[in-house]
Amino acid sequence: MTDAYSRTGAAWQAGPGAIYDRLATVLVDCRPIDFTGQLVLDLGAGTGAASRAIAAVGGVPIAIDAAYGMLAADATQRPAAVVGDAYALPLRDCAVDAVVAAFSLNHLDDPVAGLREAARITRPGGPILVSAYADDDKHPAKNAAETAAREQGWTPPPWYEQLRADRMPMLASVDRAHEALVAAGLTGDARALRVPFPELGPEQLLAWRFGMAQLAPFVATLSAAARAVMLRRARALLDNVELVRSIIVIVAT
């Protein structure tokens, strides 16, 4: 999985980036304290959506991700970043004022351990903001893109099947997210939010899906002609339905 994300950096920002930038802003807007002047870890930073959202409200972001290729995307315009493991962060105890983990802990096979490690490096009373996809986060663009890719020879990578079946469900409801919070020894709450994207048309929706880590490395191997066929097929399959992302947000202390 880490290798797939490393090979996706540029494609990610060109497609999914438009969606994840807004979702990161929504998450940071749930902060219970003023971030002005605060040192805030962007955990699982990817191409920097949460780092930009943190900086936009006056915070000082630092970034950690397991995938070097994601951190390398537009590296000269980004805050300090380091490759690191969410289970063993390369920071001392109480090193930061807050943590923002936008759609990263739901990639772990033990999100409770990830929460505990985030708490270790956060000063007492500092918030930990986490977002994950909800069980009902569905859209026709997902099936359209995957069907068209399969017709060109794509098969879902094993890590993607495991992610969908085993890992993502662990934080995908308010009840399960709250259970993880309690198991990690933290206080706070979990809530469900729906975030609309009425401005996105079919081309942007397909760019979102084809820029995801499970698809982008495969798409990069296609000839221009095969890619055009795939895009036309996906567009023909895509129902014109507004995108509304359904997410779970944890605000922990």
Image (tube, rainbow, N blue to C red):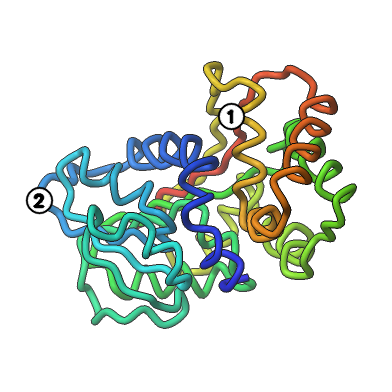
Q: Quadrant of the C terminus?
A: bottom left
Classify mark 1: helix, strand or loop.
helix
Toward the left, the furthest residue is 37
Residue 20 coordinates in the image, percent (x, y): 47, 41
Q: Quadrant of the N terminus?
A: bottom right
Q: Amino acid at mark 2?
A: Gly
* Residue at the spot 53% in from the left edge and 50% down from the top edge: 11
Residue 182 coordinates in the image, percent (x, y): 52, 62
Image quarter for residue 64?
bottom left
* Circle 1 residues within 10 Å: few <14, some 14–19, many ≥20: some
Image quarter for residue 217?
bottom right
**Dot 2 corresponds to which residue?**
37
* Residue at the spot 55% in from the left edge and 23% down from the top edge: 196
Q: Which mark is residue 204?
A: 1
In the rendered image, the vertical position of residue 253 relative to residue 200, given as above or below:
below
Q: Is residue 119 visible?
A: yes
Q: Which of these two is toward me, 65 or 179?
A: 65
Q: Which of these two is toward me, 14 or 56?
A: 14
